[in-house]
Image (spheres, rainbow, N blue to C red):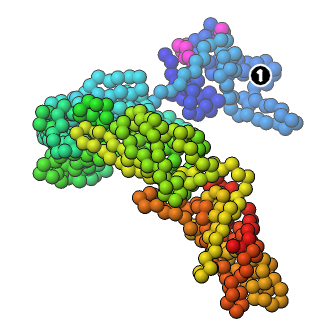
Amino acid sequence: MVTPAGARGTRAVGGVGPGPRVLLVRGPRGGGGGDGDDRRRHPVAVARARLGAAHRGAGGNATAVTRLNGGAMIRRTRLVVTAAWCTAACGGDAVSVRNVNPEGSVGGIVVDAQTRAPLEGVSVSLLAGGRVFDPEATDAAGTFRFTGVPAGDVIVTVTGGDGYNDAFIRGTLVSAAGDYPVGNATLTLGPIGLLPKSGNFRFRVLDQFGAPVSGYPMSVELQVQYVDFSGGPPVARGQIAQAVQTDGDGYATVVGLPDFFALGSVNDALLVFLPPLDADGDGIDEFSGGDAAFNLRSLDPTPDVVLDGDVATALTVRASTIAQLAGAGGATPAVVQPTGKIDVLFNLPIQPTVDVLLMDEQGVGIAVPTSALSVRDDSLTINLSPLALDFGHEYNLALHAVAAVGERFAVGDFAAPFFTVSTDADVSVIGAQRDPVTQVVTITFNEPIGGIGTSLSGGNCVVFFGFDINGANGQGDAINELGNPNCNVTLSRDEWDPPGLPGPSGYTTRWQFTAPLQTGGTPIPAGITVHLLFDHAVSQAARVERVDGRAVRNLTFPLP
């Protein structure tokens, strides 16, 4: 007979706590002595007898054992036998070590989720670790019980049969309290409310034109599998998934649903997952997919799902060399080689005929031959090589494209500016004119510059004159004179804005300012040097730059 340590008739060895136990093999009791009797006596008794005999043979009858430890005398009034010592003292008696596997019981109550009445004869099965327990049937009170269940995670399956939906409940049979194993642990579930299969729900699926969609497969998900009454008020647990398909009239039916008015506050949401739909089989989805939700306690008289095709049938630009065509890139200019190409990717295949309008910064049209265009499915490529575009210029591109989707057309109009790379090392003034009446000076640069909004003024003023404007005390004592830190001349963008295009780009070759008058009201003489001190702007956001992001250096030119 094998008895766990600590049980009646044995002693725990070495005060071993929870975890592995030392099992002592007990022999039959009987009289006599010697090795033959030793094999029949309890190992601890044998160890004591042998140790006592050795002590008496040394001339003493003391029952205590004395041990020296570093000069100090320690007395043990009880003999502590370790597992290894016991093996030696017992003359080879067997010692085995085994893990303790706590077991317990799992039980619960099964009721009707709508009436709360106990359900008799419901089949309940249990999976605990690698062990599958035979199904048990609930009694008249709706209860079930499994015993000898290994501690740990368990899965309880309640099979509702024809009248109720199944329930799958996961729980944990506690195996320990802290570091100590627990024997005869219990796990009580429920009351578990099964959902009656008493009702159905029918809805209709329509396309973007309002016509029924037949043979359309969907999956639905009810947001409750069973009702948990363990905390008092009903709580929805789990989900029920079901596959449905529309009939010839576009109707789909979800079966086996409970009466949600009888369930009270339980979650009544039903989710319908809608796959993409290509109704005419042309490889283009009229509906790109989505989902719909119904609350089964608050339904419309005719619950419908409309597969709205607006998302899939609105023609858009997904990506392009000119990011602004796709509504991306913000104010960042698109810069291309004048002999390169422009790619445009649409969200739908487009018709072979695409209208392309190309104009320069001033709105002057540039002919684009059809040989420069290539259309393949949803992509357009514009070859710029035959267009003879100039370096360092701004251009405006407008597109008109059409896609055929199902029985209707998707039309898209897109426009954005772009720039060609500059081959000049620096920005320079290549022309200037002054209106003799208004004193407005128009400057022309060799390439578009900007990135600062519409104008530079106040603390960001950059226009200074190498001239004694007030005619006193020399140059630099008056505002707007070179050498004076202040100026009040505003430098503004004078960008062309051709009609029908995306509007100003924020970069232009043409800028303007109004030259101040001398004291006495006479104009500043022509030929005076004008200094554009772009680094004088206080705000970093007011630093004028080229289209590739490089800052424009300070410039000078003679006043016209």
Q: How many marks?
A: 1
Magenta part of the chain: 24-35
Q: Can you give x and y, in whole percent of width and height, for residue 391 in the image?
A: 62, 49
At a point 26% along the width and 25% down the height, the residue shown is 135
Nearer to the camera, 338 or 257: 338
- Residue type at tag 1: His
At a point 79% along the width and 31% down the height, the residue shown is 66
Q: Can you give x and y, in whole percent of width and height, for residue 295 in the image?
A: 22, 50
Nearer to the camera, 415 or 206: 415
Residue with the most extreme right position: 71
Query: Relative to 526, is 361 above or below?
Result: above
Residue 457 in the figure: left or right of residue 290: right
Q: Can you give x and y, in whole percent of width and height, for residue 207 in the image?
A: 21, 42
Overall secondary structure of the magenta section:
loop
- 26 within the magenta span: yes
Q: Can you give x and y, in whole percent of width and height, for residue 300 in the image?
A: 15, 52
Query: Relative to 395, is 313 above or below?
Result: above
Residue 453 in the figure: left or right of residue 431: left
Can residue 398 be seen in this snapshot?
A: yes
Query: Relative to 395, is 153 above or below?
Result: above
Nearer to the camera, 161 or 495: 495
Nearer to the camera, 237 or 142: 237
At a point 42% along the width and 46% down the height, the residue shown is 356
At a point 39% along the width and 33% down the height, the residue shown is 377
Q: Tell me the crowding category of disc 1: few under 14, some 14 to 19, or many 20 or more residues within 10 angstroms, Cα based.
A: some
Quadrant in the picture for the C terminus: bottom right
- 143 within the magenta span: no
Q: Which residue is disc 1 drawn over?
A: 55
**Secondary structure state at the residue bearing disc 1:** helix
The picture quadrant where one finds residue 489 is bottom right
